[in-house]
Amino acid sequence: MRILKLNPEDVEAQVAGLNHCTWLTKFLYKGKDAYPLIDEWIEKESESYWKSEEYLYNPWNHHMCPAAVEMYKLYGVFPVGDSVRSVSPWWFNTDLKTKQKWFSSGGPDSEVGWTMRFFRLRERLKMMKNLAEDPNVIISKQIPPTPSSEAIIPFIDAVVNDKKTRLTLNVLNNGVIEGLPDDVIVEVPVKVSRDGIKREKVGKLHSRLMFHIMIPRWQRMEIILRAFREGDKTSLLLMLMEDHRTKSLEQAKTLIDELLAQPWNSDAREYYR
């Protein structure tokens, strides 16, 4: 909304999909379809935005990056949030140079992004340690108790204080997204109150999105779940062999063996046969 210069009060949006795999399934501005505004921005303003300082020097600024735009063209629906990272095609992520083409500074999941993440984490931990050890510091002044973008506090507030709140949460599908089983967890808009959770109907998704993203991710979940329920090590191997990054059968076998050989995986080592 900010990049498109839209008044948030005039926007109606719906975001739906799977966990960390959500898409802009409804986008209205003043009651009219706002997707043409995205198309116009892509055509007229995207290139200049991708050359701006606001975009270039922040690996986490991926919401309107070239990867997001290309995913929109490929799958027919604009990706939202972590989808730009977790669902971006493998050919966007082969090496740092390629990542820098599709994401600002290579994106959060690049050598650049991870270096910055670890540096910020180290500084954050240092600050927390200093605050904890100084009894004279008022922590709320150093870390103001302001709302984050996480949904847990608004969820608790809605249930305990009966504040009818629209949130995007992970819930059983139960027919919300057509084409997925009822017992699959989906991430969709819901209304939360003391009376419980009421799902917002989503319906059909774009066919390319369903067949190339949603169904394959659901099936991978089922494979992992079946492997767990049956303790089937071979199923884990077959799953790895379907990954484009796997170079050989021997490499995949070695990876599984090395993971299971870790001391903290002793129970898993005994379980998977």
Image (cartoon, rainbow, N blue to C red):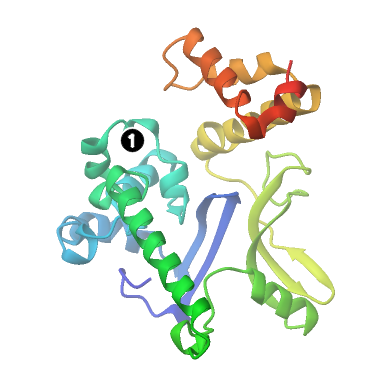
Examine the rendering and report whether any part of residue 228 can be seen: yes
Q: Looking at this rendering, what residue extends furthest in the right direction?
A: 195
Image position of 212 (left or right of 57) = right
Dot 1 amino acid type = Asn
Camera-side residue: 273 or 90?
273
Q: Residue at x 73, y 20 (%)?
A: 272
Camera-side residue: 110 or 187?
110
Q: Residue at x 27, y 60 (%)?
A: 58
Write down the quadrant of residue 36 in the picture. bottom left
Examine the rendering and report whether any part of residue 30 can be seen: no
Residue highlighted by disc 1? 93
Q: Dot 1: what SS?
A: loop
Q: Which x, y percent locates residue 174?
A: 78, 49
Q: Which x, y percent locates residue 161?
A: 77, 85
Question: Could you tell me which quadrant the C terminus lies in?
Answer: top right
Q: Residue at x 48, y 88 (%)?
A: 137
Write down the quadrant of residue 62 in the picture. bottom left
- For disc 1, the neighbor class at 10 Å (few under 14, some 14 to 19, many from 20) is many
Question: Could you tell me which quadrant the N terminus lies in?
Answer: bottom left
Q: Which x, y percent locates residue 163?
A: 73, 83
Q: Which x, y percent locates residue 145?
A: 54, 84
Q: Is residue 136 above or below residue 8?
A: below
Q: Is residue 137 above or below residue 229?
A: below
Q: Is residue 271 above or below residue 7?
A: above
Q: Residue at x 21, y 60 (%)?
A: 57
Write down the quadrant of residue 14 in the picture. bottom right
